[in-house]
Amino acid sequence: MDEGMTIARVAQRTGLTARTLRYHERAGLARRGRDTYVARQELLEAHRADVIAEIEQLRSDLEVVDHKIGLYRRRITGEQ
């Protein structure tokens, strides 16, 4: 949970009860603040790598689509 959010606010935003959130916090499943910064950064860096891979795949797919569009344009106009 974010340091700047109260348990009540997190409960409202997530639909979980405050009791459930506090249970998870005590169990070490939900932590607040600086102790999660490294883990958050690692998750974001992994997500960034996934996004870059998806962008590269989309660019490749776009090249194939553009090539096919070109083929049909040439066939329509009679070009070789």
Image (cartoon, helix red, strand yellow):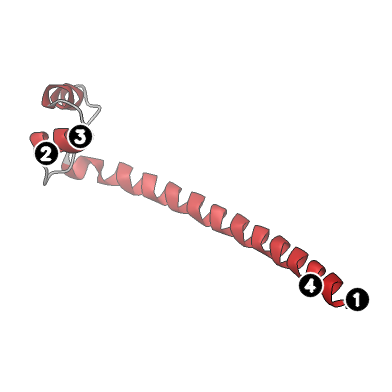
Q: Secondary structure at mark 4?
A: helix
> Which residue type carries mark 2?
Arg
Quadrant of the drawing holding the N terminus: top left
Task: Name the residue tied to disc 4.
Answer: 73
Instruction: Tell me the kind of residue under disc 4.
Output: Arg
**Residue under the point 65% across and 62% down:** 62
Left/right of residue 30 with respect to residue 70 in the rendered view: left
Camera-nearest label, 1 or 3: 1
Q: Are marks 3 and 4 in contact (CB under 8 Å)?
A: no
Is 17 located above or below residue 34 in the figure? Answer: above
The residue that label 3 is drawn on is 31
Above or below, 57 against 74 in this view is: above
Alpha carbon of mark 4 to alpha carbon of mark 2: how far? 56 Å
Point 76% across, 63% down: residue: 68
The CA distance from mark 3 to mark 2 is 15 Å
Label total for image: 4
**Real-space Cα separation, disc 3 to disc 4, in angstroms:** 58 Å
Mark earlier in primary sequence (4, 2): 2
- Write down the residue under mark 1: 80
Residue in the image at 21% along x and 31% along y: 15
Query: Label 4 crowding class (10 Å Cα cut-off): few <14, some 14-19, many 20+?
Result: few
Choose the circle earlier in sequence order: 1 or 3. 3
> Amino acid under label 1?
Gln
Provide the secondary structure element on which disc 1 rests.
Answer: loop
Q: Which mark, by number, is residue 22?
A: none
Residue where numbered disc 2 is placed = 9
Q: Does residue 21 appear left or right of residue 54 in this picture?
A: left
Label 1 vs 4, first from the N-terminus: 4
